[in-house]
Structure formats: C-alpha cells, structure tokens
Amino acid sequence: MAFLDTATRLIAVRSTADQPSQLLEALDLVLAEVGPGFTVERFQSHGKPSALVYAGPSRPHFHVVLNAHLDVVPGTDPQFSPTVLDGRLYGRGTHDMKLAALVMAQVFTSVARDLPYPLGLQLVTDEEVGGHDGTAHQIAAGVTADFVVIGEQSALRIVTDSKGILQVRVHATGVAAHAAYPWLGENALLTLTAALDRILTHYPVPSAESWTTTVNVARIETSNQATNQVPSDATAWLDIRFPPDDASINGRTPDDVASYLSTLAGLPVTVDSFGPPHHASQSSPFVSALREAAVSVGYTGDFLRKHGAADGRFYYAAGTDAVIFGPGGDGQHGPAEYADLATIEPYRQALTTFLQTL
C-alpha cells in the first residue's frame, strides 16, 4: 500500500515535455524515495533536468546502471488521476514507465551500499522527446558503465534489440497553374506521392509484426491554399524505424542516408533526426544473470525485440551493452494505459537478485 500511494502521487504529476516544473517535481519525488546518504549529481540540458545517484563521494565507472525516465506523453485529465481496477493501476505513465522507475529507486536504495561494485541510478526526464538531454547528455558528460538495465515495460522479458529511428522530409517542387489547365503546370503533390510509392515499394508496410525497416508517412503538406490551383511545392514527413542489420541506414552518416533516400525517392531528402538502433549480446554474463533472476521469480526471461527506440541506443553507440527489463502492463501512450500490479513484486525481487548475484 505504501508503494501504491507513492506511485499514485508520481502518476498524478503531469511530467510532459512542455511542463518543466512538473518534470522537476517528478524527479524530486523519486529522489526523495531514494533518501539520504547517497551522492546525487544533477544535470540540466535545454531545460530538461536529470540526476545520477550513487554511493561514495565521487563518480566511479559503474559496473551496472539502472536507467529510468520520468517524463510521459500528454494525456487527458482523468489519466493523471490514477485508478486501481482488477489488479491494474491505470493512468498516464503507469506502464511507460514511472512504476518501474519507482521500483528501481527502491531497489537501488536497498542494495547499493552493500554491493561489491559501484551501482548507479540514472533518472532522466526527456526520453519521450528523444533522450538527447538526459541519457545522451550524461554519457557525453562522462558517465560510463559495463552494463545498463533500462526499466521500460517488458513483462520481465529481456529486450536485447531495438530499432533505430530516422525522421526525414521529402521535398517536391512543381509549376503552379490554373486547375482548369493542369497541363500548363506540374503538380508537386503528384510528384511527391509517386516518390513515396517508390520508397514504400522498397520498404513495404508489413501485414504483421516483422523485424524489418518500416516507413510511416506521417504528414503530407503544401503551401498551396487554393482548390483551383496546381500546387508548386509539397513535403512529406517520414518516420523510419530500422533494425541493426539494415546496412543501407545503420552505421551511415546523416548525409549518407539523405543521399540514399534521395536516390530511392528521386527527390531531395532532408534528415531531421537520426538515432542508432540498440543491440546487446544475448550471451553476455550480465544477460545470463538477469535471465536467471527472472526465472527465479517464475518468469521465462525470454528475449524480446522492440520496434520503438529507447535510450539504450545511446549506450550501444558508446560501446556499452544495455537491455530493457521492466514490469508488465499494456496500453502505453494510449487511452487505457495500465501497469499489471501482480508483476511489481516479482520485478523488484528479480532486480535485487540480479544485482546481488553478479
């Protein structure tokens, strides 16, 4: 009940990207749960606060880091008034991932002083908007580790692979004309949709879950405001998710990727953001120990691949193995997001066992 009370107060904090005071409030609430007696390093980047907690007077190279984000995507007012129903806690951030963050903080407090190696707790507030001002910022500031556990939802399965994220714009130009005389112009929207067809022919939308590169056409726009005019410009926004084995994208520079997609589309392409995928060795002793810990509390410890990007990609780029390992639930970013409360105590026990048996 004490955990549920704290979790309810944390979920009630509207810690979205546009609410800097609420981001700080969520961070301070979890730090208060950690309690005194630890070193707390605070970071700030572009208005996004984060913290790194450890035992001892100075920052070490960590053997393990527990990573959690406290920001959430926007939701309705009722979603910030969490409710319990049939063993589920409903609310924005219950599944993604405030409850896991709270468990990680409590596990850290209970074991960090007694472990024979340095353990870090990394709390960030910008994962939902890219992670560059939290996890990536701390890595750039010199935070290093041998292994990282990210508490994103996984139902106590172990995520060793996540897709990279690439967001681009495709640009088309044409010639304006009166709509009654289309042969006198060149319709930029038609040029653009033909280019999108070429991209989607190369990367077709899967009919079912598939570990392949996917392209989402998120928006098509033109400056044209008149129905009776041929558009002279058009732009499409694309969100592309790619696995580590797509050599056309992974490991390339943004300029390389822009050139590749421009050739594919036959039109100029601008790269707006580009994040690498994430991969961790399934045979590492850290992963083996985490699987054994999951099995010890009655779960399979199966491996899972995530199609969405997460902060593990920053550690992957830095040469550090990172996995996602979190409690159960469903509906993240949706209207009925919930955490499965029956998975919370096994998750706590598995994390504790993992850290104590390394």
Image (cartoon, grey):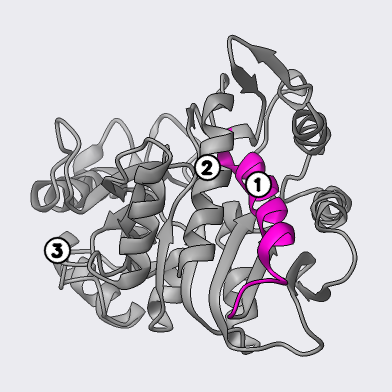
The CA span between labels 2 and 1 is: 8 Å
Residue 11 place in picture, x, y as percent: 75, 34
Residue 239 place in picture, x, y as percent: 36, 51
Q: Vertically, is 327 above or below 247?
A: above
Name the residue carrying label 2: 347
Classified by dominant secondary structure, the portion drawn in magenta counts as: helix
Q: Which residue occupies 90% across, 65% down?
A: 36
**Residue type for callout 2:** Tyr
Name the residue carrying label 1: 103
SS of the residue at dot 1? helix
In depth, the one of 358 and 249 nearer the eye is 358
Q: Is residue 302 magenta?
A: no
| Residue with the most extreme top position | 86
Q: Which residue occupies 16% across, 72% down?
A: 248
Examine the rendering and report whether any part of residue 297 can be seen: yes
**Residue type for callout 3:** Leu
**Residue type for callout 1:** Val
Label placed on residue 264: 3
271 sits left or right of 305 in the view: right
Q: Which residue occupies 28% across, 72% down?
A: 284
The CA span between labels 2 and 3 is: 45 Å
Per the rendered image, the range of residues in magenta is 95-116
Q: Earlier in the sequence, mark 2 or mark 3?
A: 3
Residue 200 place in picture, x, y as percent: 16, 47
Label pair 2/1, CB-CB below 8 angstroms: yes
- Assign the C terminus to one quadrant of the image: bottom left
Q: Quadrant of residue 290?
A: bottom left
Q: Is residue 96 magenta?
A: yes
